[in-house]
Amino acid sequence: MKTSEKILRYLHKNEVNAVFGLPSGTISPIVDSFNDFNEIEYIITKNEAAASYSACKYARVTQKLGVCLISGSVGVGNAINGIAEATQSKSPVLILSGYVDTSKQGLGAIQELEAEKLLGGIVKHSKKIVDEKDVISSIKEAIEIAYEHPRGAVHIGLPLDVQKKEYTGLEYKAGEIKKAYTDYDSLKKAVDIINESKSGLLIVGGGCRRLGGKVKKLAEKLNWRLVTTISAKGEIEEDFRLHMGYYGFSGTDLSDKYIKNENLECVIALGSRLGECSTQNFNKNLIKNKLIHIDIDKNVFDRAYKSDLNVEADLSEALDYITDSIDYKDLNNDITEPLNKAYKPNHTGLSLRILAEKITNTMPRNTFYVNDIGSSKIFNLNYMKIPREGDFECNVNYACMGSSIGAIGISRIDTNRVIGVFIGDGSFYMNGMSELITAKKYNMKIVFFIINNSELRFVNEGHRKIFGRSLNEFCDDYIEIANIVRGMGIKAITIRENEDIDNLKGFLSEVDGPIVVEVVTNTSETIPTNRYKSLKV
Protein backbone atom coordinates (compact mmCIF):
# COMPACT_ATOMS: atom_id res chain seq x y z
CA MET A 1 0.00 0.00 0.00
CA LYS A 2 1.26 3.47 -0.86
CA THR A 3 2.25 5.64 2.10
CA SER A 4 -0.25 8.27 0.91
CA GLU A 5 -3.20 5.88 1.30
CA LYS A 6 -1.82 4.56 4.58
CA ILE A 7 -1.95 8.11 5.95
CA LEU A 8 -5.67 8.42 5.17
CA ARG A 9 -6.44 5.04 6.68
CA TYR A 10 -4.57 5.98 9.85
CA LEU A 11 -6.40 9.29 10.10
CA HIS A 12 -9.69 7.39 9.86
CA LYS A 13 -8.49 5.10 12.65
CA ASN A 14 -8.23 8.29 14.73
CA GLU A 15 -11.91 9.10 14.02
CA VAL A 16 -11.14 11.71 11.38
CA ASN A 17 -14.18 12.07 9.12
CA ALA A 18 -13.25 15.21 7.19
CA VAL A 19 -10.04 16.78 5.89
CA PHE A 20 -9.91 20.43 4.83
CA GLY A 21 -7.46 21.74 2.30
CA LEU A 22 -6.47 22.83 -1.17
CA PRO A 23 -4.77 20.53 -3.69
CA SER A 24 -1.15 21.13 -4.65
CA GLY A 25 1.57 19.25 -6.48
CA THR A 26 3.48 18.52 -3.29
CA ILE A 27 0.50 16.73 -1.72
CA SER A 28 -0.88 15.19 -4.92
CA PRO A 29 -0.25 11.54 -3.87
CA ILE A 30 -2.38 11.98 -0.74
CA VAL A 31 -5.05 13.83 -2.69
CA ASP A 32 -5.12 11.04 -5.30
CA SER A 33 -5.53 8.46 -2.53
CA PHE A 34 -8.99 9.82 -1.73
CA ASN A 35 -9.99 7.83 -4.84
CA ASP A 36 -8.87 4.61 -3.15
CA PHE A 37 -10.09 5.39 0.37
CA ASN A 38 -13.28 7.43 0.49
CA GLU A 39 -14.25 7.01 4.14
CA ILE A 40 -12.99 10.55 4.78
CA GLU A 41 -14.69 13.58 3.22
CA TYR A 42 -12.25 15.86 1.40
CA ILE A 43 -13.44 19.48 1.61
CA ILE A 44 -11.59 21.67 -0.90
CA THR A 45 -11.72 25.35 0.06
CA LYS A 46 -10.81 28.27 -2.19
CA ASN A 47 -8.02 29.46 0.08
CA GLU A 48 -5.84 27.65 2.61
CA ALA A 49 -6.89 30.17 5.25
CA ALA A 50 -10.43 28.80 5.06
CA ALA A 51 -9.06 25.26 5.33
CA SER A 52 -7.08 25.97 8.50
CA TYR A 53 -9.92 27.97 10.06
CA SER A 54 -12.30 25.11 9.25
CA ALA A 55 -10.04 22.52 10.87
CA CYS A 56 -9.65 24.84 13.87
CA LYS A 57 -13.38 25.51 14.37
CA TYR A 58 -14.21 21.82 13.92
CA ALA A 59 -11.64 20.90 16.59
CA ARG A 60 -12.62 23.78 18.86
CA VAL A 61 -16.28 22.77 18.96
CA THR A 62 -15.84 18.99 19.10
CA GLN A 63 -12.43 18.73 20.81
CA LYS A 64 -11.76 16.03 18.23
CA LEU A 65 -8.88 16.16 15.78
CA GLY A 66 -9.22 18.68 12.98
CA VAL A 67 -7.04 17.99 9.94
CA CYS A 68 -5.74 20.41 7.33
CA LEU A 69 -3.96 19.12 4.18
CA ILE A 70 -2.02 21.83 2.33
CA SER A 71 1.11 22.63 0.37
CA GLY A 72 4.12 23.12 2.61
CA SER A 73 5.07 26.39 0.99
CA VAL A 74 2.43 28.83 -0.21
CA GLY A 75 -0.24 26.71 1.46
CA VAL A 76 1.30 27.07 4.90
CA GLY A 77 1.83 30.78 4.31
CA ASN A 78 -1.84 31.28 3.45
CA ALA A 79 -2.98 29.12 6.37
CA ILE A 80 -0.90 30.77 9.11
CA ASN A 81 -3.74 32.60 10.86
CA GLY A 82 -5.99 29.54 11.13
CA ILE A 83 -3.06 27.51 12.46
CA ALA A 84 -2.24 30.20 15.02
CA GLU A 85 -5.88 30.40 16.11
CA ALA A 86 -5.90 26.63 16.68
CA THR A 87 -2.99 26.87 19.10
CA GLN A 88 -4.34 30.02 20.72
CA SER A 89 -7.80 28.47 21.22
CA LYS A 90 -6.29 25.16 22.40
CA SER A 91 -7.88 23.18 19.60
CA PRO A 92 -6.30 19.85 18.54
CA VAL A 93 -5.41 20.33 14.88
CA LEU A 94 -3.05 18.34 12.66
CA ILE A 95 -1.46 20.19 9.74
CA LEU A 96 -0.19 17.86 7.01
CA SER A 97 1.93 19.76 4.51
CA GLY A 98 3.71 18.68 1.37
CA TYR A 99 7.38 19.22 0.58
CA VAL A 100 9.37 18.96 -2.63
CA ASP A 101 11.26 15.70 -3.26
CA THR A 102 14.05 15.06 -0.79
CA SER A 103 16.47 14.89 -3.73
CA LYS A 104 15.52 18.45 -4.78
CA GLN A 105 15.54 20.13 -1.39
CA GLY A 106 18.02 22.96 -1.16
CA LEU A 107 18.34 23.27 -4.94
CA GLY A 108 15.76 26.02 -5.47
CA ALA A 109 12.84 23.80 -6.48
CA ILE A 110 9.41 25.31 -7.16
CA GLN A 111 7.49 26.07 -3.97
CA GLU A 112 10.31 25.00 -1.67
CA LEU A 113 10.09 26.30 1.88
CA GLU A 114 11.16 24.86 5.23
CA ALA A 115 7.68 24.94 6.72
CA GLU A 116 8.72 23.09 9.87
CA LYS A 117 10.89 26.10 10.76
CA LEU A 118 8.24 28.63 9.75
CA LEU A 119 5.67 26.95 12.01
CA GLY A 120 8.08 26.15 14.83
CA GLY A 121 7.12 29.20 16.87
CA ILE A 122 3.38 28.76 16.32
CA VAL A 123 2.55 25.09 16.73
CA LYS A 124 3.23 22.72 19.63
CA HIS A 125 5.21 20.29 17.46
CA SER A 126 6.65 20.52 13.95
CA LYS A 127 8.56 17.81 12.13
CA LYS A 128 9.60 16.94 8.57
CA ILE A 129 9.67 13.22 7.68
CA VAL A 130 12.50 11.85 5.54
CA ASP A 131 11.76 8.09 5.64
CA GLU A 132 8.41 6.54 4.78
CA LYS A 133 8.83 3.97 7.59
CA ASP A 134 8.53 6.83 10.09
CA VAL A 135 5.41 8.46 8.65
CA ILE A 136 2.67 6.77 10.70
CA SER A 137 4.64 6.68 13.94
CA SER A 138 5.37 10.42 13.52
CA ILE A 139 1.73 11.24 12.81
CA LYS A 140 0.72 9.19 15.86
CA GLU A 141 3.18 11.14 18.00
CA ALA A 142 1.92 14.45 16.62
CA ILE A 143 -1.73 13.55 17.29
CA GLU A 144 -0.93 12.64 20.89
CA ILE A 145 0.88 15.96 21.36
CA ALA A 146 -2.07 17.84 19.85
CA TYR A 147 -4.35 16.21 22.44
CA GLU A 148 -2.06 16.89 25.41
CA HIS A 149 -3.26 19.81 27.53
CA PRO A 150 -3.00 22.59 26.65
CA ARG A 151 -4.18 21.32 23.30
CA GLY A 152 -3.16 22.95 20.05
CA ALA A 153 -1.89 22.63 16.50
CA VAL A 154 0.87 20.28 15.34
CA HIS A 155 2.57 19.94 11.97
CA ILE A 156 3.99 17.06 9.94
CA GLY A 157 5.85 17.77 6.69
CA LEU A 158 5.74 15.08 4.02
CA PRO A 159 8.12 15.21 1.01
CA LEU A 160 6.57 14.24 -2.30
CA ASP A 161 8.71 11.14 -2.81
CA VAL A 162 7.97 9.88 0.71
CA GLN A 163 4.22 9.98 -0.01
CA LYS A 164 4.70 7.96 -3.22
CA LYS A 165 6.66 5.08 -1.70
CA GLU A 166 5.23 1.77 -0.58
CA TYR A 167 4.71 1.85 3.16
CA THR A 168 7.11 -0.50 4.93
CA GLY A 169 6.68 0.67 8.51
CA LEU A 170 4.84 -0.90 11.41
CA GLU A 171 1.12 -0.90 12.16
CA TYR A 172 0.00 1.47 14.91
CA LYS A 173 -3.08 1.92 17.04
CA ALA A 174 -4.86 5.26 17.15
CA GLY A 175 -3.10 7.99 19.08
CA GLU A 176 -3.59 7.81 22.84
CA ILE A 177 -5.56 10.61 24.49
CA LYS A 178 -4.19 11.02 27.98
CA LYS A 179 -6.47 11.84 30.86
CA ALA A 180 -6.09 15.36 32.17
CA TYR A 181 -4.59 15.92 35.61
CA THR A 182 -6.88 17.03 38.44
CA ASP A 183 -5.40 18.43 41.63
CA TYR A 184 -7.88 17.19 44.25
CA ASP A 185 -5.86 18.60 47.16
CA SER A 186 -6.34 22.10 45.77
CA LEU A 187 -10.01 21.39 45.08
CA LYS A 188 -10.44 20.61 48.79
CA LYS A 189 -8.92 24.00 49.61
CA ALA A 190 -11.27 25.63 47.11
CA VAL A 191 -14.25 24.09 48.90
CA ASP A 192 -13.05 25.55 52.20
CA ILE A 193 -12.68 29.04 50.71
CA ILE A 194 -16.11 28.84 49.06
CA ASN A 195 -17.78 27.69 52.28
CA GLU A 196 -16.21 30.62 54.14
CA SER A 197 -17.44 33.14 51.53
CA LYS A 198 -21.00 34.38 51.62
CA SER A 199 -21.08 36.38 48.38
CA GLY A 200 -19.44 35.50 45.12
CA LEU A 201 -19.48 35.31 41.34
CA LEU A 202 -18.80 32.61 38.76
CA ILE A 203 -16.91 33.59 35.60
CA VAL A 204 -17.63 30.90 33.04
CA GLY A 205 -15.01 30.58 30.30
CA GLY A 206 -14.50 28.54 27.16
CA GLY A 207 -13.09 25.62 29.14
CA CYS A 208 -16.69 24.95 30.21
CA ARG A 209 -17.86 24.14 26.68
CA ARG A 210 -20.41 21.30 26.87
CA LEU A 211 -20.48 21.66 30.68
CA GLY A 212 -23.31 24.18 31.00
CA GLY A 213 -25.50 21.81 32.97
CA LYS A 214 -22.79 21.21 35.56
CA VAL A 215 -22.09 24.93 35.86
CA LYS A 216 -25.76 25.58 36.53
CA LYS A 217 -25.83 22.91 39.25
CA LEU A 218 -22.93 24.63 40.99
CA ALA A 219 -24.59 28.03 40.67
CA GLU A 220 -27.88 26.64 42.02
CA LYS A 221 -26.17 25.30 45.13
CA LEU A 222 -24.20 28.48 45.72
CA ASN A 223 -26.98 30.85 44.68
CA TRP A 224 -24.22 33.02 43.25
CA ARG A 225 -24.72 34.87 40.00
CA LEU A 226 -22.61 34.09 36.96
CA VAL A 227 -21.33 35.76 33.82
CA THR A 228 -20.04 34.14 30.64
CA THR A 229 -17.06 35.17 28.57
CA ILE A 230 -17.08 35.31 24.78
CA SER A 231 -15.84 31.73 24.52
CA ALA A 232 -18.65 30.44 26.73
CA LYS A 233 -21.58 32.30 25.20
CA GLY A 234 -24.36 29.86 24.43
CA GLU A 235 -23.32 27.32 27.07
CA ILE A 236 -25.89 28.62 29.56
CA GLU A 237 -29.21 30.01 28.40
CA GLU A 238 -29.58 33.72 29.08
CA ASP A 239 -32.86 33.27 30.96
CA PHE A 240 -31.25 31.07 33.64
CA ARG A 241 -32.21 32.72 36.92
CA LEU A 242 -28.61 33.52 37.96
CA HIS A 243 -27.13 34.40 34.57
CA MET A 244 -26.25 38.08 34.05
CA GLY A 245 -25.15 37.50 30.46
CA TYR A 246 -21.91 38.34 28.76
CA TYR A 247 -19.05 40.20 30.44
CA GLY A 248 -15.96 41.24 28.51
CA PHE A 249 -15.31 43.87 25.86
CA SER A 250 -18.26 45.72 27.32
CA GLY A 251 -20.81 43.36 28.80
CA THR A 252 -24.50 43.54 29.49
CA ASP A 253 -25.66 46.56 31.45
CA LEU A 254 -26.49 44.32 34.40
CA SER A 255 -23.12 42.54 34.53
CA ASP A 256 -21.28 45.86 34.30
CA LYS A 257 -23.33 47.39 37.11
CA TYR A 258 -23.20 44.35 39.38
CA ILE A 259 -19.44 43.82 39.13
CA LYS A 260 -18.77 47.52 39.60
CA ASN A 261 -20.97 47.95 42.67
CA GLU A 262 -20.92 44.62 44.51
CA ASN A 263 -18.10 43.88 46.97
CA LEU A 264 -17.96 40.17 46.24
CA GLU A 265 -16.03 38.05 48.71
CA CYS A 266 -15.02 35.39 46.20
CA VAL A 267 -14.75 35.07 42.43
CA ILE A 268 -14.39 31.62 40.84
CA ALA A 269 -12.94 31.67 37.32
CA LEU A 270 -13.91 28.45 35.53
CA GLY A 271 -11.97 27.63 32.37
CA SER A 272 -11.11 31.24 31.55
CA ARG A 273 -7.62 32.63 31.00
CA LEU A 274 -8.92 35.96 32.39
CA GLY A 275 -7.50 37.75 29.38
CA GLU A 276 -8.30 41.21 28.11
CA CYS A 277 -11.45 40.18 26.27
CA SER A 278 -12.90 38.37 29.30
CA THR A 279 -12.16 40.97 31.94
CA GLN A 280 -13.15 44.24 30.27
CA ASN A 281 -9.57 45.30 29.66
CA PHE A 282 -8.28 43.77 32.93
CA ASN A 283 -10.83 45.67 35.01
CA LYS A 284 -9.66 46.04 38.61
CA ASN A 285 -13.29 46.01 39.80
CA LEU A 286 -13.61 42.40 38.74
CA ILE A 287 -11.42 40.92 41.48
CA LYS A 288 -11.72 42.81 44.76
CA ASN A 289 -11.20 40.03 47.25
CA LYS A 290 -10.51 36.31 46.86
CA LEU A 291 -9.96 34.65 43.48
CA ILE A 292 -10.10 30.91 42.83
CA HIS A 293 -8.84 30.12 39.35
CA ILE A 294 -9.63 26.65 37.98
CA ASP A 295 -8.32 25.60 34.59
CA ILE A 296 -6.95 22.57 32.78
CA ASP A 297 -3.99 24.70 31.64
CA LYS A 298 -1.72 25.81 34.49
CA ASN A 299 -0.03 28.31 32.17
CA VAL A 300 -2.97 30.72 32.47
CA PHE A 301 -2.57 31.24 36.22
CA ASP A 302 -1.33 34.46 37.85
CA ARG A 303 -1.12 36.63 34.77
CA ALA A 304 -3.15 39.82 35.05
CA TYR A 305 -4.65 38.76 38.40
CA LYS A 306 -2.90 37.13 41.35
CA SER A 307 -5.03 34.24 42.57
CA ASP A 308 -5.58 33.19 46.16
CA LEU A 309 -5.82 29.63 44.89
CA ASN A 310 -4.95 28.09 41.52
CA VAL A 311 -6.40 24.68 40.71
CA GLU A 312 -5.16 22.66 37.75
CA ALA A 313 -8.04 20.36 36.93
CA ASP A 314 -10.31 18.81 34.37
CA LEU A 315 -13.30 21.18 34.53
CA SER A 316 -15.86 18.38 34.39
CA GLU A 317 -14.31 16.63 37.40
CA ALA A 318 -13.77 19.91 39.24
CA LEU A 319 -17.39 21.00 38.84
CA ASP A 320 -18.67 17.63 40.08
CA TYR A 321 -16.35 17.62 43.09
CA ILE A 322 -17.04 21.19 44.20
CA THR A 323 -20.81 20.90 43.72
CA ASP A 324 -20.93 17.69 45.77
CA SER A 325 -18.67 19.06 48.53
CA ILE A 326 -19.79 22.64 49.21
CA ASP A 327 -22.49 23.75 51.59
CA TYR A 328 -25.77 25.03 50.21
CA LYS A 329 -26.11 28.83 50.48
CA ASP A 330 -29.59 30.12 51.22
CA LEU A 331 -29.36 33.39 49.29
CA ASN A 332 -31.79 35.30 47.11
CA ASN A 333 -29.77 36.31 44.07
CA ASP A 334 -32.42 35.62 41.44
CA ILE A 335 -32.27 38.10 38.56
CA THR A 336 -35.45 40.12 38.22
CA GLU A 337 -33.99 43.17 36.47
CA PRO A 338 -33.42 43.23 32.69
CA LEU A 339 -29.95 42.37 31.41
CA ASN A 340 -29.86 45.56 29.34
CA LYS A 341 -31.52 48.95 29.34
CA ALA A 342 -34.47 49.34 27.00
CA TYR A 343 -33.71 50.11 23.36
CA LYS A 344 -33.96 53.77 22.40
CA PRO A 345 -34.02 54.59 18.68
CA ASN A 346 -31.34 57.30 18.70
CA HIS A 347 -30.04 56.54 15.22
CA THR A 348 -31.20 56.11 11.65
CA GLY A 349 -31.56 52.97 9.59
CA LEU A 350 -31.46 49.36 10.69
CA SER A 351 -30.45 48.57 14.28
CA LEU A 352 -27.91 45.80 14.83
CA ARG A 353 -29.22 45.51 18.37
CA ILE A 354 -32.75 44.79 17.16
CA LEU A 355 -31.38 42.29 14.65
CA ALA A 356 -29.46 40.51 17.43
CA GLU A 357 -32.53 40.44 19.68
CA LYS A 358 -34.90 39.12 17.03
CA ILE A 359 -32.84 36.81 14.83
CA THR A 360 -32.86 33.79 17.16
CA ASN A 361 -36.66 33.74 16.92
CA THR A 362 -36.37 33.75 13.14
CA MET A 363 -33.74 31.02 12.70
CA PRO A 364 -34.17 27.37 13.78
CA ARG A 365 -33.78 27.01 17.54
CA ASN A 366 -30.74 24.75 17.21
CA THR A 367 -28.86 27.14 14.92
CA PHE A 368 -25.12 27.31 15.55
CA TYR A 369 -24.08 30.99 15.42
CA VAL A 370 -20.55 31.94 14.35
CA ASN A 371 -19.43 35.55 14.71
CA ASP A 372 -16.54 37.24 12.95
CA ILE A 373 -14.45 40.14 14.21
CA GLY A 374 -16.11 43.54 13.84
CA SER A 375 -18.86 45.70 15.24
CA SER A 376 -21.56 43.04 14.88
CA LYS A 377 -19.90 40.84 17.52
CA ILE A 378 -20.41 43.46 20.24
CA PHE A 379 -24.12 43.72 19.51
CA ASN A 380 -24.52 39.94 19.35
CA LEU A 381 -22.53 39.29 22.52
CA ASN A 382 -24.67 41.75 24.49
CA TYR A 383 -28.10 41.30 22.95
CA MET A 384 -28.36 37.92 21.20
CA LYS A 385 -30.02 35.28 23.36
CA ILE A 386 -28.92 31.82 22.27
CA PRO A 387 -31.72 29.23 22.74
CA ARG A 388 -31.04 26.16 24.84
CA GLU A 389 -30.70 24.07 21.67
CA GLY A 390 -28.32 26.53 19.97
CA ASP A 391 -24.62 27.33 20.20
CA PHE A 392 -22.21 30.19 19.58
CA GLU A 393 -18.56 30.55 18.55
CA CYS A 394 -16.36 33.62 18.24
CA ASN A 395 -12.62 33.86 18.81
CA VAL A 396 -11.89 37.41 19.91
CA ASN A 397 -8.66 36.51 21.68
CA TYR A 398 -6.72 35.93 18.46
CA ALA A 399 -9.14 38.35 16.81
CA CYS A 400 -8.45 37.74 13.14
CA MET A 401 -10.85 39.15 10.56
CA GLY A 402 -12.34 36.47 8.35
CA SER A 403 -12.08 33.65 10.91
CA SER A 404 -15.84 32.98 10.82
CA ILE A 405 -15.39 31.18 7.52
CA GLY A 406 -14.37 28.29 9.77
CA ALA A 407 -18.12 27.65 9.85
CA ILE A 408 -17.30 25.34 6.94
CA GLY A 409 -15.66 23.05 9.49
CA ILE A 410 -18.55 23.29 11.93
CA SER A 411 -20.92 22.32 9.11
CA ARG A 412 -19.27 18.89 8.91
CA ILE A 413 -20.18 18.06 12.52
CA ASP A 414 -23.86 17.83 11.63
CA THR A 415 -24.64 18.49 7.98
CA ASN A 416 -28.34 19.00 8.76
CA ARG A 417 -27.78 21.73 11.34
CA VAL A 418 -28.20 25.32 10.18
CA ILE A 419 -25.30 27.70 10.85
CA GLY A 420 -25.73 31.47 11.11
CA VAL A 421 -22.58 33.45 10.30
CA PHE A 422 -22.32 37.13 11.20
CA ILE A 423 -19.57 38.77 9.19
CA GLY A 424 -18.77 42.38 8.27
CA ASP A 425 -18.19 43.48 4.71
CA GLY A 426 -14.46 43.91 5.40
CA SER A 427 -14.06 40.32 6.64
CA PHE A 428 -16.33 39.08 3.85
CA TYR A 429 -14.13 40.61 1.16
CA MET A 430 -11.03 39.27 2.93
CA ASN A 431 -11.98 35.59 3.33
CA GLY A 432 -15.70 35.04 2.98
CA MET A 433 -16.62 35.88 -0.60
CA SER A 434 -14.71 33.07 -2.31
CA GLU A 435 -15.84 30.53 0.29
CA LEU A 436 -19.49 31.09 -0.59
CA ILE A 437 -18.61 28.96 -3.59
CA THR A 438 -17.31 26.24 -1.24
CA ALA A 439 -20.53 26.37 0.76
CA LYS A 440 -22.54 26.05 -2.45
CA LYS A 441 -20.41 23.20 -3.81
CA TYR A 442 -20.95 21.08 -0.70
CA ASN A 443 -24.54 22.27 -0.15
CA MET A 444 -23.75 23.62 3.32
CA LYS A 445 -26.69 25.00 5.27
CA ILE A 446 -25.04 28.29 6.20
CA VAL A 447 -26.88 31.61 6.41
CA PHE A 448 -24.42 34.48 6.00
CA PHE A 449 -25.53 37.74 7.61
CA ILE A 450 -23.18 40.23 5.95
CA ILE A 451 -23.13 43.55 7.79
CA ASN A 452 -22.53 46.02 4.97
CA ASN A 453 -21.71 49.52 6.20
CA SER A 454 -19.12 50.17 3.46
CA GLU A 455 -16.32 50.79 5.92
CA LEU A 456 -14.03 49.20 8.47
CA ARG A 457 -16.30 50.55 11.16
CA PHE A 458 -14.59 49.26 14.29
CA VAL A 459 -11.29 50.67 13.03
CA ASN A 460 -12.80 53.94 11.82
CA GLU A 461 -14.68 54.66 15.03
CA GLY A 462 -11.72 53.60 17.16
CA HIS A 463 -9.42 56.05 15.42
CA ARG A 464 -11.87 58.87 15.92
CA LYS A 465 -12.26 58.06 19.61
CA ILE A 466 -8.51 57.70 20.22
CA PHE A 467 -6.90 60.23 17.87
CA GLY A 468 -9.79 62.58 17.19
CA ARG A 469 -9.50 61.91 13.45
CA SER A 470 -9.57 59.07 10.96
CA LEU A 471 -8.60 58.22 7.37
CA ASN A 472 -10.93 58.45 4.40
CA GLU A 473 -9.41 55.19 3.16
CA PHE A 474 -11.26 53.29 5.91
CA CYS A 475 -14.46 53.84 3.90
CA ASP A 476 -15.56 52.44 0.52
CA ASP A 477 -18.28 53.10 -1.99
CA TYR A 478 -21.35 50.95 -1.39
CA ILE A 479 -21.29 47.63 -3.25
CA GLU A 480 -24.51 45.64 -3.43
CA ILE A 481 -23.25 42.31 -2.13
CA ALA A 482 -26.58 40.57 -2.69
CA ASN A 483 -26.21 41.10 -6.45
CA ILE A 484 -22.71 39.58 -6.43
CA VAL A 485 -24.03 36.58 -4.54
CA ARG A 486 -26.95 36.06 -6.90
CA GLY A 487 -24.40 35.93 -9.70
CA MET A 488 -22.97 32.86 -7.95
CA GLY A 489 -26.40 31.23 -8.05
CA ILE A 490 -26.91 31.69 -4.29
CA LYS A 491 -30.17 32.92 -2.77
CA ALA A 492 -29.84 36.43 -1.31
CA ILE A 493 -31.89 39.26 0.17
CA THR A 494 -31.07 42.83 1.25
CA ILE A 495 -32.53 44.42 4.38
CA ARG A 496 -32.16 48.10 5.30
CA GLU A 497 -34.78 48.92 7.97
CA ASN A 498 -35.91 47.38 11.26
CA GLU A 499 -39.21 46.45 9.63
CA ASP A 500 -37.34 44.24 7.17
CA ILE A 501 -36.07 42.02 10.00
CA ASP A 502 -39.55 40.64 10.65
CA ASN A 503 -39.85 39.65 6.99
CA LEU A 504 -36.84 37.36 7.19
CA LYS A 505 -38.80 34.51 8.76
CA GLY A 506 -40.47 33.62 5.49
CA PHE A 507 -37.29 34.03 3.47
CA LEU A 508 -35.37 31.76 5.86
CA SER A 509 -38.16 29.24 6.38
CA GLU A 510 -36.25 26.61 4.40
CA VAL A 511 -32.46 26.52 4.46
CA ASP A 512 -31.31 23.83 2.04
CA GLY A 513 -27.98 25.42 1.08
CA PRO A 514 -26.07 28.67 1.57
CA ILE A 515 -28.13 31.85 1.84
CA VAL A 516 -26.97 35.46 2.13
CA VAL A 517 -28.74 38.21 4.05
CA GLU A 518 -27.11 41.53 3.20
CA VAL A 519 -27.66 43.81 6.18
CA VAL A 520 -27.16 47.39 5.00
CA THR A 521 -26.47 49.74 7.91
CA ASN A 522 -24.99 53.15 8.52
CA THR A 523 -22.76 54.04 11.46
CA SER A 524 -25.17 56.13 13.50
CA GLU A 525 -25.94 53.41 16.07
CA THR A 526 -23.43 53.51 18.92
CA ILE A 527 -21.32 50.39 19.43
CA PRO A 528 -21.74 49.31 23.09
CA THR A 529 -18.05 48.86 23.93
CA ASN A 530 -15.26 50.40 25.97
CA ARG A 531 -12.56 48.69 23.93
CA TYR A 532 -11.08 51.99 22.77
CA LYS A 533 -10.03 52.98 26.31
CA SER A 534 -7.33 50.31 26.35
CA LEU A 535 -5.86 51.57 23.07
CA LYS A 536 -5.45 55.22 23.99
CA VAL A 537 -1.90 56.51 23.80
Image (tube, rainbow, N blue to C red):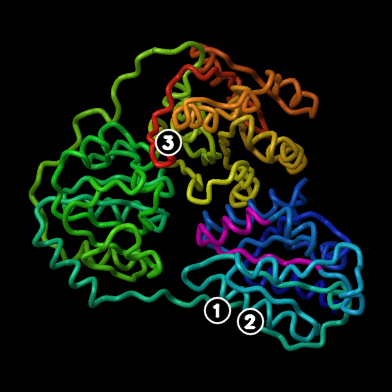
Disc 1 residue type (three-letter): Glu
Q: Nearer the viewer, mark 3 or mark 2?
A: 3
**Residues shaded magenta:** 80-98
The reply to whether the C-beta atoms of the residues labelled 3 and 2 are less than 8 Å apart is: no
Q: Secondary structure at mark 3?
A: helix
The reply to whether the C-beta atoms of the residues labelled 1 and 2 are less than 8 Å apart is: yes
Q: Is residue 97 left or right of residue 457?
A: right
Disc 2 residue type (three-letter): Lys
Q: Secondary structure at mark 1?
A: loop
Asked if one can make out residue 518 in the rendered structure from this viewpoint, the answer is no
Q: Position of residue 250 (x, y in %)?
A: 36, 36
> Is residue 179 part of the magenta span, yes or no?
no
Disc 3 residue type (three-letter): Tyr
Residue 483, located in which quarter of the rendered image? Answer: top right
Answer few, some or many: residues within 10 Å of disc 3's Cα (few below 14, many 20 plus, some between 14 and 19): some
Pick the residue in front: 300 or 188.
Answer: 300
**Mark with earlier residue (3, 1):** 1
> Is residue 95 part of the magenta span, yes or no?
yes
